[in-house]
Amino acid sequence: MLDSGCQLQPDDITITLGCQNALMLSLQAVAKSGDTIAIESPAYHGVLQILEVLNLKAIEIPCSAQHGIDLHLLEEAAKEWQIKACVVTPNNQNPIGATLNTQARKRLIQQSIQYGFTLIEDDVYGELSYKDKRERSLKADDTHNTVIYCSSFSKSIAPGFRIGWVVGGQFQAQIEHYAYVQSLAVPTLTQIAIANFLENGAYDRHLRKTRQSYQDNLARCQALIQEYFPIGTQTSTPNGGFLLWITLPDTVDAMALHAQALANGIGLLPGLAFGLTAQFRHHFRLNYALSWDNQTDAALKKLGQLCHQQLDSYP
Ligand SMILES: Cc1ncc(COP(=O)(O)O)c(C=O)c1O
């Protein structure tokens, strides 16, 4: 948290069962059934699922790979509807990899103050920036206590640990109570293991190595997509993380591609998972976190061939 620019006391933080749990607790504390929540579009599908379970209404605010969430449209939405909270990923957004610039961060916080909504900051990819130094968190510039910060070690170490945290600000007591009611506690042994990993410097070394390997994998992915995919295919340009958003020509259906890829042992997430409507049917998300080998090259080549097959069979 210090690296992200925050000055906190231990009691400001609640340890959670991953970031998903942190987001769930935050939304439970901030909103009640029927309230309206602004989300990015495309959105991390886990947020869509939480909104559904909590019976919250979603307003999708378009998000571009270059600029992140469209703040003009967020403001228009805030003028028109009573938005209770906005869930936003300022660093290396899932799925499009966008990172907000300094000006956008200021404007976002300003909007939350002006229109009275809470910002739920999902920073789960924040430590995976390819730059030498990670970006500041929104929480670091939270002058009016409108930001709740959520993160975890799932992306930076491993999802199986299920260790995350939330800085709840004005909702901290409520969040802590809900966390207690839902799970009583978070496993202590894994917390101690991670604490040791952080303390002895191994985490920083691990992050340096991991970021470099993700950056190398990204370059390989982009080169192979350029070589094997149909003309007109576009990819996002992430500055961190391990997710690539691919926009296919209009005649290629990502759901069909998903089924064909799976039959060939290749996993991808079709765009439909990231929105409430069918707007992302020609998109899909690739995960390039795994270590690279010949099979990865072959898989990307195969995906390109499957796209070409769809194009060729289009009437
Ligand atoms: C943007 C985002 N937030 C939260 C999560 C959930 O993280 P965790 O595994 O720590 O619950 C994910 C996992 O994919 C994610 O991509």
Image (cartoon, rainbow, N blue to C red):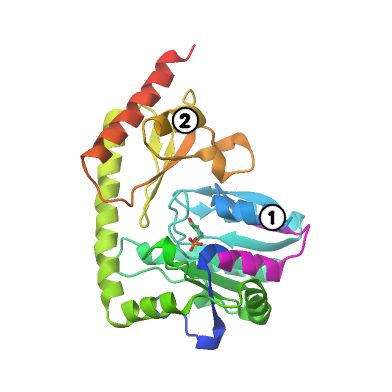
Disc 2 element: helix
Taking 183 as reference, is 8 above or below it? below
Mark pair 2, 1: CA separation = 27 Å
Disc 1 element: helix
Q: Which residue is painted at 39% across and 28% down in the image?
A: 232
Measured from the top left, where is residue 283 in percent x and y? 48, 36
Q: Is residue 239 left or right of residue 20?
A: left
Q: Which residue is painted at 34% across and 48% down in the image?
A: 288
User: Mark 2 or mark 1: which comes first in sequence?
Assistant: 1
Queried on whether the Cβ of the residue with tag 1 lies below 8 angstroms from ligand 1, the answer reads no
Q: Nearer the viewer, residue 152 or 90?
A: 152
Which residues make up the magenta segment? 21-38
Q: Mark 1 points at which residue?
A: 53
Outermost residue to the right: 34
The amino acid type of the residue labelled 2 equals Ala
User: What number is the disc on residue 259?
Assistant: 2
